[in-house]
Amino acid sequence: MTLLDVIKADVGLSPIHLATIVVFCLAILYIGLVRRPAFPARSPKIIRGNWPIVGSLGFWRKRYDWWIEAGEQAETKNFSFHVGKHRLVGTFSEEGRKTFFNHRQLGFTEGYAVLFGQSPSYDETGSDEELHLTNDHFHRRIAALLKTEKLVKVLPTLIADVSSGLQELAVTSPDETDPFDSIYKLVYRLTLRIVGATEIAESPHLSDQTLHLFGQIEQTARPYQIIWPWLPSPALFTRYWAGAKMYMIFSKILNARKKTEQKLDDPLQFLVNQGDDIRQIISFIVGALFAGQLNSGYNAAWILCYLATYPRWLNQVRKEVSVVADKHIPGSDTLVQKLSKLPLEVWEHGFPTIELCLRESIRLQLHGSGFRKNISGKDVIIDDEVVPPGGFLVYHFGHHLRNQEIYQDPEKWEPERYLPDRAEDKKSPNAYVGWGTGRHPCLGMRFAKLEQNIIAAFFCAIFDFELFDSTGAKMVNPPEPQVNAWSACGPEMSVKLRYKPRNKE
């Protein structure tokens, strides 16, 4: 007796009934996995390699290289492809770039929520009201926390964190450090001062634990999780488990404060005072980390790597730091002591050389793609072609920021390209997009520049340093960025900053 005979005997189904069930299951499988919305006739031509179910595999494997190959196929400088069931239009054109950054019906939050794997549902019908409310809540809270009066109040703590953190680094790792670990963690501590909780910022254990949980959440944006967000998977389990543990940590902190009637003057207490519940608090903090920690954490390390391999710029930064400190804090204090007394306006506007270095580091490290969702309910037109309702417009920042028509020798780190005699970032509208542009400038830009200035100034004031590779050889050129990365990251090769305290400081 065959298995089919056993099934028929047990459940009393005829062959016709069984065939109907099989056909029904196949139909559900087709609708759920294979069938997807077609592009309208006016959409750009679909590129080669747009496979059923998964869409374009190259989009996941080597995104920058795939983007260049897709552009070679794009007769109109625009092209269409799928990511699972989602319809995407990539653009290379000037008009497409303007549309991407400035069109009012292209949703920033809606685009990233789906294509960064942070949305648990598939929806191509338009904007999500709950997502809109969450986004509005996030904008209001981050704007309030970055007001001048709050930054003035927290500035001494930020400076003390950097100064003591670097001094401690010289003791615990007296000869060398991996900046993509140590500096990244230092940035995390500063970020907690702005959007997190004092208890975590001042506890090495809680700081390491929550940073690890954030990393777990960040790493769950896997291709299959984005294509099939409803699919039970290790990534989905990891995300919810990490979120649950984060919830428990903050819940424990809030309960302890309530029990002891302790009210600290920090971001967590501010959120509580605004009436936010713990779900909103964790959602805000994790969102703020996604918005700032990755980019700022890695860029702070990259700047030091570039300065270590460009002595001319390192000397210019050192000169600027010394001149600014002496100008605003005259007297016999050491350079580190003078830096510790500088007011907020000096930290924000008094270090143009460091800002040039940061600007150029961001240009070389901004590799990922940007996404905007068409939430208008109708076609969005670019170059006489259309992005369909519920579809996405995609733009690759790395390709743009390495465009030879805009930037001379774009693979080189040259902060001087932004000086008035070259002004390459002013060659065309939206020529520089490192801080966002158009309708979506970076919300945390003010704090990001502040923490980068403090870290770079103190590191250059405290240490003499050089860069070495994993074999122990001194590097005269910086390591190559990972151009196919999805977001900011360190180099593929392991590097170390070797340093020693500066004698006169």
Image (tube, grey):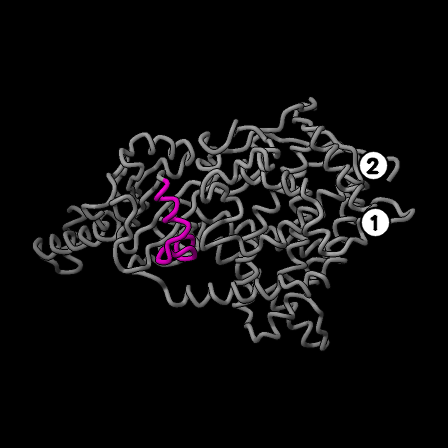
**Residue 179, label in figure:** none
Report helix, strand or loop for mark 2. Answer: strand
In front of the other: 177 or 161: 161
Tally of marks: 2
Give the quadrant of the C terminus.
Answer: top right
Q: In which quarter of the image is residue 473?
A: top right
* Comparing labels 2 and 1, the label whose residue is closer to the camera: 1
In front of the other: 495 or 356: 356
**Residue 338, label in figure:** 1
Report helix, strand or loop for mark 1. Answer: helix
What residue do we see at 67% from left, 23% from top? Answer: 476
Per the rendered image, the range of residues in magenta is 94-112
What residue do we see at 84% from left, 51% from top? Answer: 329
Q: List x then y, in percent, for residue 435.
A: 53, 48
What residue do we see at 76% from left, 56% from top? Answer: 343
> Principal SS element in the magenta part?
helix
- Left-right relation of 382 to 499: left
- Left-right relation of 49 to 442: left
* Magenta-drawn stretch contains 386: no
Q: Measured along the vertical axis of the image, is residue 366 above or below residue 404?
A: below
* Magenta-drawn stretch contains 108: yes
Q: Which amino acid type is marked by label 1?
A: Lys
Residue at the outermost right position: 332
Q: Quadrant of residue 174?
A: top right
- Left-right relation of 330 to 151: right
Query: Dot 2, crowdedness within 10 Å: few (<14), some or many (≥20)?
Result: some
Query: Dot 1, crowdedness within 10 Å: few (<14), some or many (≥20)?
Result: some
Q: Which amino acid type is marked by label 2?
A: Pro
Spatial CA distance of label 2 from label 1 is: 17 Å
Q: List x then y, in percent, for residue 440.
A: 47, 54
In front of the other: 242 or 167: 167
Residue topped by disc 2: 501
